[in-house]
Image: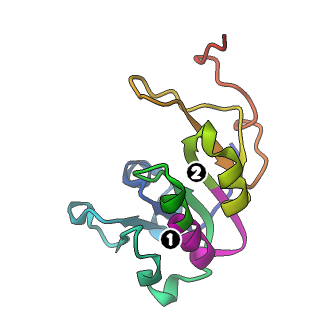
Amino acid sequence: MQAYASKCAFLSTPSIYFSLKNKDIKENSKNFDIDESLKDKNWIYYDYRHPEEIPQELHNTFDFILIDPPFITEEVWTLYSKAIDMLKNENCKILLSTIDENKDMIKWLTNCDIRPYWPSIPNLVYQYSLYSNYEDEALNSLNPEIVMD
């Protein structure tokens, strides 16, 4: 898999942040979350309802942003898009998850397109999709465990 980042912002995705194997990327990345039990040296207090509270010194510094919000409404995505605009550098790659019905809104707010690859998450009410603002062979291929009717 191609490496896309050297400095990542993990917004509401602590499990992915903590699963990072690449020590250099993890060292340079930030875990943005409201849950203080997740504190480590790279944890940043982040309440999605207040993106304006993101520390100024982190603005325009990330080359990759990953988002999995707790809610899928337009109001929530509008706030996350403000955080994206603050955090991204000019070549930033964005990867996010939400439902298919949000496709047009996500394109408008983040310039991300829906991808064929689906996260396989059993027992969810909705099927989530991945969206990105960049091309990737893996994201553009349907994963084999997903059966289309």
Outermost residue to the bottom: 56
Tag 2: residue type? Leu
Q: Which residue is mark 1?
A: 28
Category of crowding for the residue at label 1, using alpha-carbon neighbours closer than 10 angstroms: few (below 14), some (14–19), many (at least 20)? some
When asked about the image quadrant of residue 147, the answer is top right
Residue that mark 2 sits on: 96
Mark 1 or 2: the one toward you: 2
- The quarter of the picture where residue 39 lies is bottom left
- Horizontal side, residue 7 vs residue 45: left or right: right
Residue 85, magenta (yes or no): yes
C-alpha distance separating marks 1 and 2: 20 Å
| Residue 99 percent coordinates (x, y) | 56, 39
- Image point (50%, 71%), residue name: 28
**Residue 25 part of the magenta segment:** no
Instruction: Inspect this view and state whether residue 74 appears.
Output: yes
Mark 1 and mark 2 lie on one chain; the one further toward the N terminus is 1
Magenta region: which residues?
79-94
Camera sees residue 3: no
The disc labelled 1 sits on which kind of residue?
Asn
Callout 1: SS: helix
Compare residues 15 and 3 and report the one nearer the observer.
15
